[in-house]
Image (tube, grey):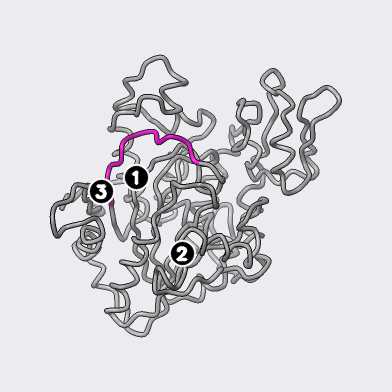
Amino acid sequence: MPKSKVYFTDLRTRPSVNLLKKLETLIIKTGIDSIDFKRKLVALKIHFGEPGNLAYLRPNYAARIVRYLKSKEAVPFLTDCNTLYWGRRSNAPSHLEAAFENGFNPIATDCPVVIADGIKGTEYREIRVNLELCKSAKIGAAIADADIIISLNHFKGHELTGFGGALKNLGMGCASVGGKLFLHSGSSPRIFEKNCTGCRICEKYCAHEAIAVGKDKIAHINYEKCTGCGQCVAVCQYDASRVVWQNSSENACKKISEYAFAAVKDKPSFHINFIMNVSPDCDCWDTNDYPLVPDIGMAASFDPVALDQASADKVISAPALTGSRICNNHDNGDMSGKDKFKHAHPDTWWQSGIEHAVRIGLGSRDYELITI
């Protein structure tokens, strides 16, 4: 079986060749022109970023892709689905306000913004896949109804899956609120009491009133209410709330791969990873930590699995930034060749999602890296 091709460009520029020009050159070299865009509805799946977080992708990149697509007579729109947890992106009106605030608006991008699963996250299409863990997937209606999907992915760490890239943006990002609940099920967190300070930050950010600080000044989880969304894990500053993954870790990553399979099923798709501002956590939170590694570049492929594997290899090969979370947590600052994501989130195992994506036929881990 031939290796999947992944095209890569670094972030070095020169007069008349800026990063936006390099992005356009990258997608053309990758072969995006092989897709027939004429009069097709093109979903540009992107994460708009929780306001306060500044690591999300600049809207300028989306605007450049929009300009290219319009030159091909496509009908593009920027899109994402609502979140399961509390925040400014948990319903469409607030989600749109957050997107506009971060620059994803028709003025800046020359493109409409559509919240794919509607006002309350209940508008979806049931996509039959008949896979190991998922017989059908609840994909946001606007994404499911699009003719073509292009994923623009900020490649960074993630507290649930180790890292977030194309698979995460497609699988979790295209799921309706009900779909996200399915994806998170079976991965509830645990409170490590010796680390808990009773600060109540987890209590404040839990959308389901499933966690509360008791008289003992320790947080306690009501597992009858807990959805396993991981919000308390992300906001805890004392490493007291942790997801105890074990087998459920693999299941969460597998489910995401199966939802990614559903998102691109029976339609052309193309994927771009922006390996920059590689923050340890997701752009879902209203803060972003110091990056784990220096900015690396942009990569593109028709194969989201090969793209994520190549991007992970790039981050693993890179030196860690002094002062980043992984250097603070480990005495040895020389992290070149080591799995940065595993060090940032020891209880996650991102390889399980990649391996499962290969098994279900979504793509290949074997890739040929072509630098332009």
The local crowd at label 3, few if under 14, some if 14 to 19, many if 20 or more residues have their Cα within 10 Å, is many
User: Which residue corresponds to mark 3?
Assistant: 367
Q: Are marks 3 and 1 in contact (CB under 8 Å)?
A: no
Comparing marks 3 and 1, which lies closer to the viewer? 1
Asked if residue 151 can be seen in this view, the reply is yes
Q: Is residue 70 above or below residue 62?
A: below
Q: Horizontal and vertical percent for residue 57? A: 40, 54
Q: Earlier in the sequence, mark 3 or mark 1?
A: 1
Q: Residue 276, which numbered label? A: 1
Mark 3 vs mark 1, CA separation in Å: 21 Å
The three-letter amino acid code for the residue at tag 1 is Met
Q: Horizontal and vertical percent for residue 208? A: 75, 48
Q: Residue 104, which numbered label? A: 2
Comparing marks 2 and 1, which lies closer to the viewer? 2
Instruction: Identify the residue at horizontal 79%, vertical 35% (top origin).
Output: 212
The verdict on residue 35 being magenta is no
Mark 2 vs mark 1, CA separation in Å: 19 Å
Instruction: Identify the residue at horizontal 73%, vertical 33% (top origin).
Output: 200
Q: Earlier in the sequence, mark 3 or mark 2?
A: 2
The three-letter amino acid code for the residue at tag 3 is Tyr
Q: Horizontal and vertical percent for residue 219? A: 76, 29
Using the rendered view, name the quadrant where residue 73 is placed: bottom left
Give the magenta range. 288-298
Badge 1 marks a residue whose secondary structure is loop
The local crowd at label 1, few if under 14, some if 14 to 19, many if 20 or more residues have their Cα within 10 Å, is many
Instruction: Name the residue at the top extreme.
Output: 331
Name the residue nearer the viewer: 188 or 284.
Answer: 284
Name the residue nearer the viewer: 90 or 38.
Answer: 90
Q: Main secondary structure of the magenta part?
A: loop
Q: Earlier in the sequence, mark 2 or mark 1?
A: 2
Q: Is residue 153 above or below residue 315?
A: below
